[in-house]
Image (cartoon, rainbow, N blue to C red):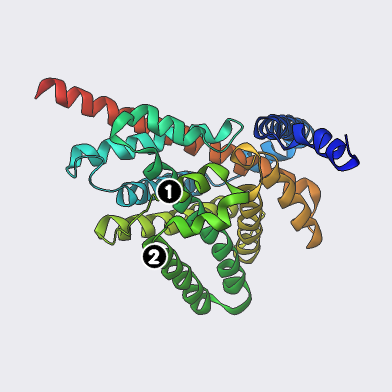
Amino acid sequence: MSHRSKINAVALPMSDPSQRAKWRRLFVVSLTAAALGFMGFLSVQYWSEAWAWLAHANPFLIVASLGSLLASFYGSALLFVASIQGGSLSSGHGGQHKLIASFLLSQIGKYIPGRVWSIALQKALLGTDLPIQSAVLTNLKLAILSLVLAAGAAIAFMVWSSFGLFLGFVAFSAVGIALFILFAFRLSARTGVVLQRLWPLAARLLYEGAQQKPQINILGIVGIILYELGYCVGWLCLMLASASVNLDAGLRLTALLSLSYVIGLISLLPAGLGAREGALLVIGGWYGMETASLASVAIVTRLALLVVEFAAALLGTAILALQKWHGTNS
């Protein structure tokens, strides 16, 4: 056997797709365990600071924050409905409600290691009514919108803090226009070139020729407005709920929070668990903020997100139950 053949023989097992998938799963699970350990340490070490933050917070702003964030989730559900092709489900209100409920319920799948469990839950709830290609492409589009919203909101909040409300409003409007353009953008097989490394499953489906046509309708427009407005108002209200945070500090904290959200979205961790919190501590530390204050914000924002996602899942369950009850009695 030649020297080159020996090298190929040794390298071949590592080039096996099943072996690569095995090591990738092991890496993701290990990373998730490390993130959970970090979150546990953060919660134990700084729980008293987080509790003091909550104890002295403005309850009206807390409720306004949670309601706004839930509205943002509902807006993303409307975008999900507007993106799914009309042929896969009936275009009536019954089909739309089922799609909304399935999307809201599927968000709990983000906390399972891997990038496909939300889609798996949507498929399980909708069955053959939802083609897997449409599900993947729609969730891909929403992931891109989430990245743009978080990054754009961070810039807009910094503009508001540095240059005033008028230019801040212009920046937020620009973010909304960018979201609308991206939402109308046609995803096709050519997009798979970029996705080959980032999301192999999506890339494979795109290469098979699946396409997502733009859906420019009132549902999509309302969804974008709710999505952006609920996100920005929700997180800003939560920052301002603290008795020790004024408007300028709240704007900067919300900007840092949005930047950490970007890190969480691009990480391999489920729901950005640990990545968001770690990024907030690091970025805030660069700005000279106290670690204890940043840790309390990280804990409170994660708790708020869990509450909102649980409420969204309950809302989705209620919608499905009401639809089933209505169908039984009609």
In-front residue for pair 283/137: 137
| Residue annotated with mark 2 | 180
Question: Is 93 drawn above or below residue 257 in the view shown?
Answer: above
Ranked by sequence position, the earlier of labels 1 and 2 is: 1
Picture disc at residue 137: 1
Q: How many numbered markers are drawn?
A: 2
Question: Residue at point 42% right, 50% down?
Answer: 72
Q: Amino acid at mark 1?
A: Leu
- Residue 293: image location, x then y, percent: 74, 49
Q: Label 1 crowding class (10 Å Cα cut-off): few <14, some 14-19, many 20+? A: many
Question: Residue at point 32% right, 40% down?
Answer: 100
In-front residue for pair 52/258: 258
Question: Is 129 drawn above or below residue 165 in the view shown?
Answer: above
Eye-nearest disc, 1 or 2: 1
Question: Residue at point 48% right, 35% down?
Answer: 118
In-front residue for pair 97/55: 97
In-front residue for pair 60/17: 17
- Residue 310: image location, x then y, percent: 47, 32
Hey, which residue is sitting farthest left in the picture?
A: 330
Question: Is 91 drawn above or below residue 244 in the view shown?
Answer: above
**Residue 242 seen from this side:** no
Q: Amino acid at mark 2?
A: Phe
Q: Is 144 placed left or right of 249 in the picture?
A: left
Q: Is 179 placed left or right of 195 in the picture?
A: left
Q: Is 260 placed left or right of 234 in the picture?
A: right
- Residue 39: image location, x then y, percent: 72, 34
